[in-house]
Amino acid sequence: LRSADSVASSGDWKPNPLDHTATSGAIMEMGDLDASATTLVLRTSKKLTFQQMLTVLDRVCVLANCQHAYDFVYMPWTKLAIVNFCSVDNCRLCFRAFGTSNEPHIRFVGQAVIQGLQANLALFLSKGADYMSDPGAPRIFANGQEVDMQEALNHFRISEARSKAGRPDL
């Protein structure tokens, strides 16, 4: 078995769920990642606040040498986060960085079922308007800064309408 450290820069690295050497004795499972993935699921061993999760994400992004790497963070439970990255490359780099990080409370990192910012926003919109005021609602980011949810949803609706009309969003 090769460790994540020995192949992290080889380009053909596949996470090995049996290799836990990078987690300082903690057991972290790494799921598979499709070539087009942008959204990850993170499971933790302890309850984290939203701010604690952002701190973990920011540390991993620094390790991956990515700035402003994510644009969607949703924590439906205190031990689960869904994170969409701004690009396939950012997702892959951060996925690899999780495999070599020393984040003690991260227990699983894998590909989410719903992929992409628009698909995650569409799922969120399907829950209804009452959900927007929920403190546990997803948070949207642009260039590392949180964006007002209503503003993000309005932009999403405009982009969706343009797409349906055959005019892609610029």
Image: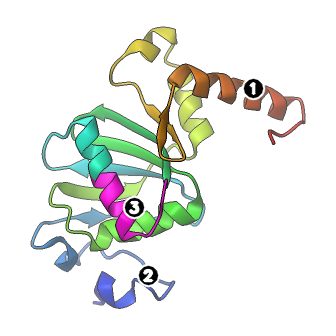
Left/right placement of residue 75 relative to residue 164 reads left
Residue 168 placed where, x, y %? 84, 40
Residue 158 placed where, x, y %? 75, 26
Which residue bears the numbered disc 2? 13
Viewer-side residue, 145 vs 136: 145
Is there a contact, CB below 8 Å, between mark 1 and mark 3?
no
Residue 50 placed where, x, y %? 28, 36
Which residue bears the numbered disc 1? 158
* Magenta-highlighted residues: 56-68
Left/right placement of residue 78 relative to residue 75 reads left
Identify the colour scheme used. Answer: rainbow
Residue that appears at 66% across and 22% down = 154
Residue that appears at 23% across and 43% down = 52
Which residue bears the numbered disc 3? 61
Q: Quadrant of residue 76?
A: top left
**Sequence-first disc among 2 and 1:** 2
Which image quadrant: the N terminus?
bottom left
Q: Is residue 161 above or below residue 110?
A: above
Is there a contact, CB below 8 Å, between mark 3 and mark 2?
no
